[in-house]
Amino acid sequence: MKSNEPGSGSRKLFRCAAWALPLLLSGGVAFEISRLERIAGSPFPITPAPHFSPITASAADALPGLDDLLVPQPHSVARGQTLLRVFEELGLESEDARVAASAATEHLDPRRLRAGERFSAYFGSEGSVARVVFEVHQQGRVEVARSSGGWQSEWRPYRLMTQQRVLAGALAGGFEASVEAAGGPAMVAYRLADVFQWDLDFNRDLRLGDRFAAVYAEVRADGRFQRVGEIEAAVYENQGRLLQAYRFGEGGAYYDGEGRPLRKQFLRSPLEFSRVTSGFSHRRFHPVLKTYRPHYGVDYGAPTGTPVRVTASGVVVSAAWNDGGGRMVVVRHPNSFQTSYLHLSRFADGVRGGARVTQGQVIGFVGSTGLATAAHLDYRVRQNGRYIDPLSVRNEPAPPLMGASLERFFVVRDRLREELSRAPSPMTSLDVGPLSVGG
């Protein structure tokens, strides 16, 4: 590669590195001292102390693996860059690059190479690339190395380790930012929204000063943070009520402090994060038609493309164009309920009449089709053919745990409460009886 390319100076430095002469300790214990030259072309040998005896060493006596000691040069895949092009731009001739790329495909699917993905290049003492390491997200790395027979690749899976973390904080702005201020990754906010999605509408229920605490799993790969795992326990104090959640059982379901499941027939909201821009009304001024008429749903403002979740399991009645409603999905549920999702930009794959959908499944994406002045979701609920306010739907929980299952749950709950009690202020004490929160 040309000397003006990134990293060429450091490679030249290593090419000019020289191993210092091995020295013999006066006590009879031999050891080797190595020092890299700091100025290319000007080697400075180590001057031995008077009681040392210098020994002449040949090049064959040098320690092996000098190339492995080189600091890797980080790169990322450019937009439209192919695997072959990656190796060519690292300085390989066309045929050599083709062989290296072919070796990489033994463990790396070139069709899944995405712009921004990271890889590192290692250069040998002669200045040519000796090894390239591709990071495979959350799984491992593919190492492609030059060998006597050309190029070989090897798959090295990450050594995954799960650590338990505890955080506590107060809502001082956006929920994501508040979680980060409490010392956790932003993804914990989304995990908590999933946990409390049946009891807390994160679009309209949150208030400044709300307090929360959580025990969650952190997955690390080869010692580096990789992702947020499951929420094991969480509490959220909102407008005088304290919500509790404890993960229990093989299915990983969540229960409150008394062993009642959090899952209910309906989610509190079809969107994870947004805002209510218009409520249910029997007489509302229509912004397009410029007249007063009933508005039988709740409008949620959100950017185009925001995923829309079905609030309860059921069967799709229709997924089609509906004049003023634009692209609309209608779903039939047990107990004579029916929900509608209007003004979608597009439908999710597989969502069509007759398809079964499960609670929380993405069925479409926010848009502004039909009679709409801006991107939003119009969400409607009917029971026995009559429209009702979606925000007033009674959400009865499933039956609680009983007998031996309840006793096992209490053991898990008490252990998790102990973990939560280690959370720093603003939540400092959690009792095993009726839960109390200290400030």
Image: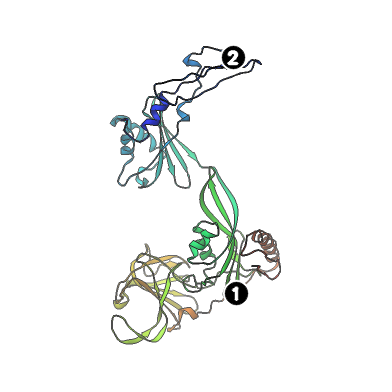
> Relative to residue 209, is residue 144 drawn left or right?
left
Q: Is residue 167 above or below residue 323?
A: above
Residue at left offset 70%, top offset 66%: 431
Q: From mark 1 to mark 2, how far is it between C-alphas?
A: 79 Å
Assess disc 2: are there few (<14), some (14-19) or many (≥20) residues with their C-alpha within 10 Å of its C-alpha.
few
In this view of the protein, which residue sits in the foreground, 170 or 390?
170
Residue beneath label 1, please?
Answer: 241
User: How far across and how far down the image is residue 181, in percent?
Assistant: 53, 59
Residue beneath label 2, please?
Answer: 50
In this view of the protein, which residue sits in the foreground, 348 or 280?
280
User: How far across and how far down the image is residue 429, in percent?
Assistant: 67, 65
Q: Within the image, what quadrant is residue 253 found in? A: bottom right
User: How far across and how far down the image is residue 394, in percent?
Assistant: 53, 79
The kind of residue on which mark 1 rests is: Arg
Residue 151 seen from this side: no
- Dividing the image into 4 quarters, which one contains the N terminus? top left
Indicate the secondary structure of the residue bearing disc 2: loop
The kind of residue on which mark 2 rests is: Pro
User: How far across and how far down the image is residue 210, in percent?
Assistant: 56, 70
